[in-house]
Amino acid sequence: MSGEKMTVMQRMMMVVANRLPNCQKTAELVSESMDRSLPVGTRIKVWMHLKMCSLCQRYADQLRFIHIAVHDHGDRLLEPSEGTPAMSNDCKNRIKRALRESS
Ligand SMILES: [Zn+2]
């Protein structure tokens, strides 16, 4: 019966899922993987979690995007490029005021 098979399948999935890192741990590992390569076993667990969890998948995509952007353009981000005016004190103060009022 297919119903029986599904139950076995679901039980197997649960066993696998229980061995996988949770969302918080996965987020940490994804972030860590940007700086150093993780052990193969850990990489597989993270990969499996990402396959099952769309939230962590999105987080990993965004982190990868930021990582690439900073890697490619980081030096430009640190120094204001020519033609980009620095933020005026008046502008900074308006932002500070708005933040204070909204909190
Ligand atoms: Zn997750």
Image (spheres, grey):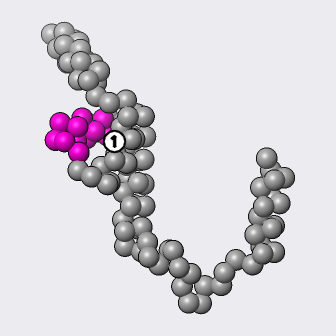
Identify which residue is drawn at 50% across, 74% down: 77
Magenta range: 38-51
Rendering quarter of residue 16 = top left
Res. 40 in view = yes
**Mark 1: secondary structure:** helix
Note whether 58 is above or below 94 in the view shown: above
Kindly report the secondary structure that dominates the magenta region of the rendered protein.
helix
Res. 13 in view = no
Q: Amino acid at mark 1?
A: Leu
Q: Nearer the viewer, residue 94 or 56?
A: 94
Tell me residue 28's x, y (percent): 39, 41
Identify which residue is drawn at 56% across, 81% down: 80
At label 1, counting other C-alpha atoms closer than 10 Å, the crowd grade (few under 14, some 14-19, many 20 or more) is some
Identify which residue is drawn at 30% across, 49% down: 33
Rendering quarter of residue 20 = top left
Q: Nearer the viewer, residue 95 or 7?
A: 95
- Residue 44 shown in magenta: yes
Identify which residue is drawn at 41% across, 47% down: 58
Tell me residue 25's x, y (percent): 38, 34
- Residue 19 shown in magenta: no
Q: Is mark 1 within 8 Å of ligand 1?
A: no
Note whether 62 is above or below 82 in the view shown: above
Number of residue marks: 1
**In which quadrant of the rendered image does the N terminus lie?**
top left
Q: Nearer the viewer, residue 50 or 92?
A: 92
Residue lying farthest to the bottom in this orientation: 83
**Residue holding disc 1:** 29
Note whether 55 is above or below 1 in the view shown: below
- Taking 94 as reference, is 11 left or right? left
Rendering quarter of residue 7 = top left
